[in-house]
Every structure is written in C-alpha cells, then in structure tokens.
Image (cartoon, rainbow, N blue to C red):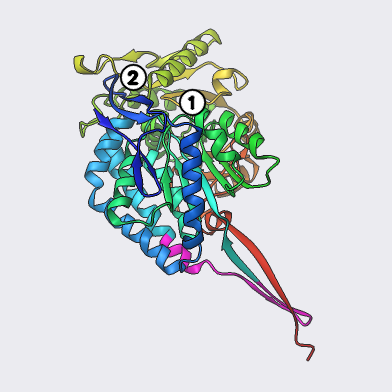
C-alpha cells in the first residue's frame, strides 16, 4: 500500500488530523494506496507557505522561472514510463492512452508555457496626446483545482502558466486520482524546487475547498470539473472579486452530414465517443446524423463499437479500460437504466462487464449506443461522463443547429461535411467554445480553450492563460506635442 502525502512548503506531510482515504485501483475494485484526508488546518498551512514564497518567487526573473519549468519537463520525460503506469492504475484508462497522451502532454505543458512566456510582454499605444504602456505582474498565491479524468495532463495545464507568470500555487488534484500529482511533488523535491512555490494538497473538496477558495490571500482560482462544483466556487468567490476561471461540463454534439467523408467520420466518432471510456469533457456524446445515411452510419458505428477491446488497462492491446470509481460506474449504469425508461433502445453495451476473472470486481461498463430518444430527455441533456452515446437523425441544417444548441452546455462540437460554406455556417451558429470541422481533439496550445453557457467562464491556453494569472496595469505619459 503506497502512502500518498501532501507536499507543503517543500516538505512531505500527512494530513494534520492523521486521517486518510483509500485510493482504489478501478480495474480491480480494490484499494492500493492511501491519500491524506486533509482539512482546513492543512489548507491554511499550504496558503501560508504559498504566501511566504510569493515574496521571493514574484521577483524572480521570468527567464529563471521558465528555467524551472523546463527542468520539470525534462524530469517528466525521464520518468514518463513510470508515470504512465501509475496514471493507468490510478484512473483505469488504457496504458497506451496514458503513455501516448496524458504524460507527453504534461511534459509539453511545462515546455510550452516556459517558451510562451518569452513573448508575454506588454503593449504600447502611442498617439499625439499620450504614450501608454501596459505592464503584466503576478497576482499572488493562486489555487488550481483539477479533475480525475486527465489528472496530470490538466493539473500541469494550470500550474505551468501560473508559476511562470510569478504566482505561487496551491494545487488540489482529485482525491480519486492523486498518484501522478504525488509523483510530480517528488520530481519537484528532487529538483530542489523553491519551497512553497508549488504546494500539492490532497483531500476532499468538501473538506478543504471552502478554505482554499475563500482565503483572502488567494488571488485567483482556476478550476476544471463538474458544473455543480464550479457553480459553488463561483458563489463562494462572488463577493471577493478574485479572478475565477471555470472549465466545466459538456454535452457535445457530433454532427454528421450525408456528404461527409464516411470512413473518417465513422472512425473519429468511435474515438470521440469512447476515448478514456467517454470520460473526457470534449467527448461527443450526442451523435446527430443526417437521415439519408442514418441507418448505414448507425449500423457501421455499432459494429465498430462492439469491436473495441475492453480489458486490463495495463495490457497494450486494451482500448477500453475501467471507469474511474464505483460511484462513477453506478452513475453511468443509472443513466443507461433511465434511457430505457425514457424510451431509448440499447444498440450495444448497456451493462457492467468483467473482462476476466481477475477483473471481476473492476468498474467496467461496455461501450453503449442508444437510439430513439428526443433531444429534450435527460439522457440527452445531462452530462453522463461515461461510455454512453446517443444517435439522433435530423433532416435539415437548421434542425441540426437547433438540436446541437438544445442543452445548457456549450463546450465543443464536431461538424462533418465536405461543404465549406455549410461548415462555416454551422461553426457560426453552434453555441460552443470549440468547433471542429472534420476533426476532433485537434489542438494548438496557443488557442483559447473554454466553454459557453454552463460549460464555463474564462479561457485557458497560450497568452490567454498567462493573462488570466496576471494583473495588467497601464502606465500613461503625455505625448510629444510636436
């Protein structure tokens, strides 16, 4: 049993109370480590460490701060195989996904923001009457809260821009998937990272969240997770006027027109519906198909979905692993039951499975496709966050737009068509922060990332992320009258 510890002020500590929580291997349904069950005492200690370290870190030249990020990136690269294995065990995701996406992207996040900071400069505005120069400065201690689906990937996406802009960080990973954050704290300790600059605090949000986001020393909160928790953070910080960025849920449409590249749309739809067992906020869980190809596409999609290999996440041939927890599995199974009550027809999947006797207690749900449900039903309105997708036919472009926008979410969408003008019309009309045309998860780290409506507030990525973690000041001087 591995013992995970908090990393506060450069030191490893258990929770102040001595309490801990079991951390489960979801593929086997049994605990394999313990995580601190931290409380307000631990949270205040982390804030105090970040506040003290800020005095020095904020005055450290940006080139030196970027150098620290590059050293962390290099260490992640050297430990990538071990990190991928821990990520797979901790989350239940296939090790090929952890090794091919999660860990490389975590390394790239540090490298990217270290380099992006070189171009992070103020603007100059000159006129006859005035000369204005903008200056960016760090905010102070900030809180970065990341979810359980892409643990190290999304944690590093937040802490890298926060650190390079001169802020100190209290990072709160999910208590469900704490292992790679713990490994990151070891990397920082081994490198001799300045104490208190990065603090990694484990535990339940219900126990430490209010203390972290409510402390007056905290100047910004960056959160990725559920809409319900994001709403609670927004309410808790409303009167404090601190910066808040919220990246929350999605119920994303995948819109397939009859003139699409059928094979590419089919292959990508399988991936966009079921990658990471559907536990990605960008997954396309509502598949809207033009009626003239609906039956052909549906049947081909069912065949491809049934062919996905579900098994031990540590085996390289596995394409579908386990859901992250028993709670999440029961939630997904509950929605499948609800879909049937709402009149949906299960095309494939729809049940808990045991890929092998060794994995009989694991949290596996077969990839599930459902048809026969209207856009207004709960199955098509609520974020299920599992290997469940619905198929709905449409007749016109206008109907597809109406269906795409008929949820309270607005994170992403994919549109499949060879008609460039139609693609542009769809992109302009769909209420989402990201619209892919004939693609999914095609990312450039410089672009703004975030959602509309209940999917979020604010944008991450590139200069947008650096600006979020900075205070902007304008310095104005009289212009030269001549």
For the residue pair 167 and 385, the one nearer the viewer reads as: 167
Q: Measured from the top left, where is residue 142 in percent x and y?
A: 53, 48
| Res. 426 mark | none
- Give the residue number, with chain letter if any, for mark 1: 294
Residue at 69 percent of width and 39 percent of height: 238
- Residue 394, given in percent of the width and then of the height, sits at 58, 27
Q: Is residue 424 above or below residue 166?
A: above
Q: Can I make out residue 446 in this image?
A: no
Between residues 5 and 334, which one lies in front from this camera angle? 5
Q: Which residue is mark 2?
A: 363
SS for callout 1: helix
Name the residue furthest top. 341
Mark 1 surroundings: few (<14), some (14-19) or many (≥20) residues within 10 A:
some
Q: Secondary structure at mark 2?
A: loop
Please state the extent of the stretch shown in magenta in the rendering: 114-133
Left or right of 345? Residue 425 is right
The reply, left or right, for residue 82 in relation to residue 233 is left
Identity of the residue drawn at 60% across and 35% down: 233
Of labels 1 and 2, earlier in sequence is 1
Q: Farthest residue toward the bottom?
A: 482
**Foreground residue among 263 and 352:** 352
Residue 143 in the magenta stretch? The answer is: no
């Amino acid at each position: 049993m591995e013992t995970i510890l908090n990393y506060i002020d450069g030191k490893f500590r258990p929770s102040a109370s001595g309490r801990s929580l079991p951390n489960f291997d979801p593929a086997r349904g049994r605990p394999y480590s313990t995580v601190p069950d931290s409380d307000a005492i631990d949270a205040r200690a982390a804030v105090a460490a970040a506040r003290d370290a800020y005095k020095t870190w904020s005055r450290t030249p940006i080139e030196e701060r970027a150098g620290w990020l590059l050293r962390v990136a290099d260490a992640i690269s050297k430990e990538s195989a071990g990190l991928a294995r821990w990520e797979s065990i901790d989350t239940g995701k296939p090790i090929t996904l952890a090794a091919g996406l999660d860990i490389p992207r975590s390394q790239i996040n540090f490298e990217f923001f270290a380099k992006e900071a070189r171009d992070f400069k103020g603007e100059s505005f000159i006129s006859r009457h005035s000369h204005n120069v903008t200056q960016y400065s760090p905010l102070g201690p900030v809180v970065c809260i990341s979810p359980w689906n892409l643990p190290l990937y999304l944690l590093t996406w937040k802490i890298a821009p926060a650190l390079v802009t001169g802020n100190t960080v209290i990072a709160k990973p999910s208590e469900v998937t704490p292992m790679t954050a713990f490994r990151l704290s070891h990397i920082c300790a081994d490198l001799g990272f300045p104490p208190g600059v990065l603090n990694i605090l484990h535990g339940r949000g219900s126990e430490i969240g209010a203390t972290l986001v409510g402390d007056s020393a905290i100047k910004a909160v960056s959160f990725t997770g559920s809409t319900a928790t994001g709403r609670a953070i927004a309410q808790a910080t409303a009167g404090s006027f601190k910066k808040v960025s919220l990246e929350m849920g999605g119920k994303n449409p995948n819109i397939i027109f009859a003139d699409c590249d059928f094979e590419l749309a089919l292959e990508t739809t399988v991936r966009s519906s079921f990658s990471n067992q559907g536990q990605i906020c960008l997954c396309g869980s509502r598949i809207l198909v033009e009626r003239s190809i609906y039956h052909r596409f549906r049947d081909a999609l069912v065949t491809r979905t049934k062919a996905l290999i579900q098994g031990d996440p540590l085996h390289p041939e596995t394409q579908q692993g386990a859901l992250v927890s028993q709670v999440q599995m029961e939630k997904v199974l509950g929605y499948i039951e609800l879909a049937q009550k709402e009149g949906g027809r299960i095309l494939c999947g729809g049940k808990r499975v045991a890929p092998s006797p060794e994995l009989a207690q694991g949290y596996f749900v077969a990839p599930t496709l459902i048809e026969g449900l209207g856009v207004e039903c709960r199955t098509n309105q609520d974020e299920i966050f599992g290997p469940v997708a619905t198929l709905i036919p449409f007749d016109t472009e206008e109907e597809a737009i109406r269906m795409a926008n008929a949820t309270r979410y607005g994170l992403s969408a994919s549109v499949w068509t060879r008609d460039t003008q139609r693609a542009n019309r769809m992109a302009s009309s769909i209420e989402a922060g990201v619209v892919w045309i004939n693609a999914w998860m095609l990312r450039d780290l410089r672009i703004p990332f975030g959602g509309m409506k209940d999917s979020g507030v604010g944008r991450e990525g590139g200069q947008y992320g650096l600006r979020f973690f900075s205070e902007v000041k304008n310095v104005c001087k009289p212009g030269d009258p001549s």
